[in-house]
Image (tube, rainbow, N blue to C red):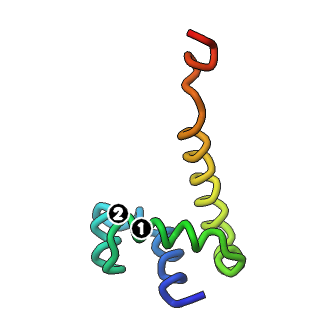
Amino acid sequence: MTDRDREILEFERSWWTLDAPKEGLINERFELSVTRYYQLLGELLDTPEALEHDPLVVLRLRRRRDRRRKARFELPPQERDGR
């Protein structure tokens, strides 16, 4: 796990305590586009090293990712009921 990987996990643990929009902080702190940041974060969340380094953050972010994926691919309730 790289120093940047650790910094990303630390940022995810505490960004909400900072008084600025997350997207701006990502660009300023990591010099990455928001899209690239989330690509790297997604890859990082799947590594055993990240889970070992910060299990609470990694598991929370995995759950959030899984909920979003599920919501994206599920039919809205009215379509499931045939309405």
SS type, badge 2? helix
Compared across the picture, whether 26 is left or right of 76 comes to left
The local crowd at label 2, few if under 14, some if 14 to 19, many if 20 or more residues have their Cα within 10 Å, is some
Which residue shows up at 55% across the image and 46% down it? 68
Query: Circle 1 sits on which residue?
Result: 15
Query: Viewer-proximal residue, 55 or 66?
Result: 66
* Dots 1, 2 in contact, CB < 8 A: yes
The label shown at residue 5 is none
Residue at horizontal 27 percent and vertical 67 percent from the top: 24
Residue at the location (56% across, 9% down)?
83
Q: Position of residue 63 (x, y in %)?
A: 64, 53
Question: Residue at the bottom extreme?
Answer: 3
Q: Quadrant of the N terminus?
A: bottom right
Q: Position of residue 7 (x, y in %)?
A: 48, 82
Query: Label 1 vs label 2: CA separation?
Result: 7 Å
Q: Single out the mark in the foreground, 1 or 2.
A: 2
Q: Which mark is residue 22?
A: 2
Amino acid type, mark 1: Trp
Could you say which quadrant of the image residue 25 lies in?
A: bottom left
Nearest to the observer: residue 17 or residue 66:
66
Name the amino acid type tagged 2.
Answer: Lys
Where residue 20 sits, quadrant-wise, is: bottom left
Q: Residues within 10 Å of mark 1 (few under 14, many from 20)?
A: some
